[in-house]
Amino acid sequence: MALRALARVNLAATERNAARLLAGLSGDARLCAVVKANASGHGAVPVARAALAGGATSLAVATVDEAAELRAADIQAPVLVMGAISAQELPVAIAARAEVVAWDERFVSDLDDLPEASVPVRVHIKLDTGMGRLGTRAMSEALSLADMVRSRTPRLELAGGMTHFATADGDQEFVRFQLAAFEPFAQRLRAGGPIVIHAANSAATLGAPGSHFDMVRCGIALYGCDPFNQEPDTAGLEPALELSSYLAAVKRARPGESAGYGRRFVAERDTWIGTLPIGYADGIRRALSNNCDVLIEGRRYPLVGTVSMDNVTVDLGPDPEAGTGAEALLIGRSGAERQTVEDLANRIDTVAHEILCGISSRVPRTYHRDGEPGA
C-alpha cells in the first residue's frame, strides 16, 4: 500500500559519493562527512555509517546533541561539533567524546574548568577569514588561543585549525582572498607540532583543490547534490534521496473550476486534477505553488494551485493515463524523467540544503542499497 509521503534513501549511492569525493582529493587529504541536521534530512546515523564505509575517516555535526546521537548508535569515528557550544552543553560534548571548536579564551577556560575527562578534549581553533560568523578575525588572537590550548596538555589537545568559505559556490576571487588569509595561520600552527588543517566545504572540495589541506568537510555533495546547484551528474555525484507520494484522488475540472486555496489555479479547458496527500508540512515549499513538476508513471505533470499543508494538486490533462493509487515523485526518477533537488531549489531561488532539510519528520525514511533492503 502506498504511503502518503515517503523518503527513500539509497545508502549505496551515499557510499559511492564518499568514495568519489575521496578519490578527487589532493595529496593525502582525508574526508570528513558532515551529517548535521539529520544528514540534511537523510538520517544521520545510516548516512554516517555509509560515508565511513565509503572512505570518510571522521564526521562533523553542528550541535552536541547530534554528536550524542551518533555515539548512542555506537559510531566510534571522531566527531567534530562545528557549532557554538554553551557552557551548559559542554558536559554533553565531553560525554560524547566530541572534538570542539574554539575562538575565544572564555570557551577554552570553560573547557579547562570541567572535570577531567578520560581522554584529552580535542580542540580546533577557528580563524574567520571572511565568513563573518564564528571564529576570530585576528590571527594573533587565534594563535594565542592555540598556545593556550597547548599549555593545558594533557587536559586539552590542539587537534586542528580551520576556517570556512563564504563564496566557494560562486565568487572564486573571494575564495582566493580567504585562502591567502588562512595559509599563514595554517603554517604557524603546523610549526608547533602535528595538527589537522581544514577549510573546504563541498563546493571548495570540487572547485578549489588548493583548499584541501589535510581534510575536507563535505555534506551536500555526500548526498549526491551539486553545491553549485547544477546537474549532479557533471560532478559524478548520485542523488541519494527520492521523495514520493501517490494520487489519492482524481477528478474532472471544467473550465472555470479551481483547485486549492485562493483559486490560484482555474481550469481553462476540460482537464483532470490529481490530488497528492503531501504538502508544506512535509517539506513541499509553498513557493512551489504553480511552480513545480510531479513525475507520474514516467511522465511530467505540472503542480497547479497553492501548495497547502497536507495536499498538492496536479494537472493530469484531458486524457489522463494515471489513475488513483499511482506513485508520484517530487524528487527522483520515473522512467526517462528525473526531477532533482537542484531543480526544485533553482525554481525558488534557494539551495539544495534548504529543500532537503525541509523534509519534515512526519515523512518516513526508508533505506536501501540500489534497491535492495539495507541500512
Image (tube, helix red, strand yellow):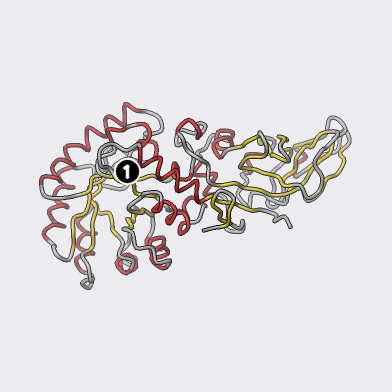
Placement of 286 over or under 41, stated as above or below: above
Front residue of this view, candidates 190 and 1 = 1
Q: Residue furthest front?
A: 372
Q: Is residue 134 above or below residue 151?
A: above
* 169 on left or right of 313: left
Q: Position of residue 261 (x, y in %)?
A: 75, 45
Which residue is found at the position 38% from the left and 44% from the top? 218
| Quadrant position of residue 271 | top right
- Where's the N terminus, which quadrant? bottom right
Q: Which residue carries the number 1 mark? A: 216
In the displayed image of the protein, which residue is found farthest to the bottom? Answer: 115
Q: What's the residue at 25%, 42% (across, down)?
A: 28
Name which residue lies at 40% across and 49% down.
Answer: 54
Q: Residues within 10 Å of mark 1 (few under 14, many from 20)?
A: many
Total numbered labels placed on residues in the image: 1
Q: Position of residue 142 (x, y in %)?
A: 18, 47
Query: In this rendering, would 145 be left or right of 212?
Result: left
Viewer-closest of 144 and 124: 124
**Label 1 secondary element:** strand
Question: Which three-letter amino acid code belongs to the residue tagged 1?
Answer: Val
The structure residue drawn at horizontal position 32% and vertical position 64%, both measured from the top left corner, is: 93
Would you say 342 lies left or right of 319 here? left
Q: Viewed as shown, does residue 204 lie left or right of 28?
A: right
Residue 208: image x %, image y %? Answer: 32, 32
Viewer-closest of 89 and 71: 71
Q: x and y percent of residue 352 in the render? A: 51, 40
